[in-house]
Image (cartoon, rainbow, N blue to C red):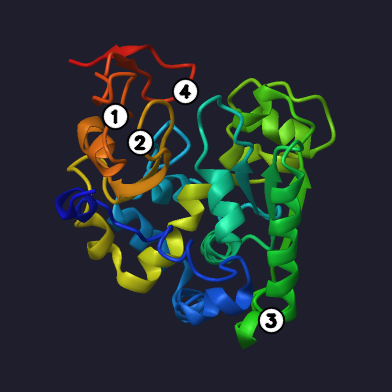
């Protein structure tokens, strides 16, 4: 793999995946983990929302809605409790970025959940993981338990006066529960069927209360924005899509896997990073004939 190919990568969320026992609190804190939380707790919640807005972070679940704008829709004058729900129901065939992130670095997600909950004034957060991936559920539960033991969760977090509890919820496996309102139905113990809108979740979501629903990667990106600043994040990517993303490459490439790169990277660049096309029977790299950019729900695209 050439240096020019690897230079296009921007390992942030994936930076410590190769560290020894990267999923533990000890390893995460050795690499600067939870420093962003301590910084965030000294900020005003609205300033955190503004920083996420200014960064240009957009939803990483597919729709690409601006995350900070979604947070600002929560009516703070509503007396009902506010909730944060993380959509970790990764069930689109061919999609494999959230599960590796939760396995390799669950504390990145947990820290993001705490900062995001503080920003929207939520005292309860839920991480909804598809039920088939029991090993992922156990790993995230262990990370949440470590965070409680270290004082990052629970009552009066680090003397800030902010309380937060996180519930790790195992879904029943229905594909439709990846849709945010069907996911809320599942969280409430009912069959996962999409709801009619309006009302939107920001006004009447979980238990008919104001709710923010974000993808794993969106929430996991928040600590790096708080730690490094909105300008740092927005300096990567394109004019309309700022920052970096985790791309999953599978199929006939030399090194399939997850690659973190600025948004706007081309498929050709990603294939170069993955070592090119896998050699065919004649020993020569196979020619790219067609590919799908986002799992089975997207059309087939050709080499052009």
Q: Secondary structure at mark 3?
A: loop
Of badges 1 and 3, the one in the foreground is: 1
Who is closer to the viewer here, 299 or 83? 299
Q: Secondary structure at mark 4?
A: loop
Q: Which numbered marker is on residue 295?
A: 4
Q: Judge whether 165 appears above or below 173 on screen.
A: below
Q: What is the quadrant of residue 121 in the picture?
A: bottom right
Q: What is the quadrant of residue 248 in the picture?
A: top left
Sequence-wise first label, 1 or 3: 3
Q: Are marks 1 and 2 in contact (CB under 8 Å)?
A: yes
What residue sits 53% from the left and 60% below the top? 116
Q: Residue furthest bottom?
A: 159
Residue 200 x, y percent position in the rendering: 58, 33
Residue 65 x, y percent position in the rendering: 40, 37
**Circle 2 Cα neighbour tier, 10 Å, few/some/many (<14 / 14–19 / ≥20):** some
Q: Secondary structure at mark 2?
A: loop
Q: Are marks 1 and 3 in contact (CB under 8 Å)?
A: no
Q: Does 123 sit left or right of 253 as displayed?
A: right
The number of callouts visible is: 4
Sequence-wise first label, 2 or 4: 2
């Amino acid at each position: 793999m050439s240096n020019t190919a690897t230079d296009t990568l921007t390992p942030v969320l994936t930076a410590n995946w190769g560290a020894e026992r990267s999923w533990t609190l000890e390893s995460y804190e050795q690499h600067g983990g939870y420093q962003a939380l301590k910084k965030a707790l000294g900020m005003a919640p609205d300033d955190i929302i503004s920083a996420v807005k200014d960064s240009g972070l957009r939803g990483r679940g597919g729709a690409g809605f601006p995350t900070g704008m979604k947070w600002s829709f929560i009516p703070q004058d509503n007396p009902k409790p506010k909730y944060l729900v993380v959509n970790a129901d990764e069930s689109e065939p061919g999609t494999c970025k959230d599960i590796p992130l939760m396995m390799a670095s669950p504390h990145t997600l947990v820290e993001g959940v705490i900062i995001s909950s503080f920003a929207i004034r939520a005292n309860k957060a839920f991480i909804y993981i598809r039920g088939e991936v029991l090993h992922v559920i156990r790993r995230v539960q262990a990370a949440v338990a470590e965070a409680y033991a270290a004082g990052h969760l629970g009552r009066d977090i680090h003397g800030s006066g902010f309380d937060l509890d996180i519930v790790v919820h195992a879904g029943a496996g229905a594909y439709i529960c990846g849709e945010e309102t069907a996911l809320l139905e599942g969280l409430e113990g009912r069959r996962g069927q999409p709801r009619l809108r309006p009302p939107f979740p920001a006004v009447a979501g979980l238990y008919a209360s104001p709710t923010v629903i974000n993808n794993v990667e969106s929430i996991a990106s928040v600590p790096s924005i708080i730690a490094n600043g909105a300008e740092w994040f927005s300096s990567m990517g394109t004019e309309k899509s700022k920052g970096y993303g985790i791309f999953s490459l599978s199929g006939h490439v030399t090194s399939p896997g997850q690659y973190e790169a600025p948004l706007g990277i081309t498929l050709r660049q990603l294939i170069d990073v993955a070592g090119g096309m896998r050699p065919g029977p004649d020993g020569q790299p196979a020619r790219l004939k067609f590919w799908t950019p986002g799992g089975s729900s997207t059309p087939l695209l050709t080499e052009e």
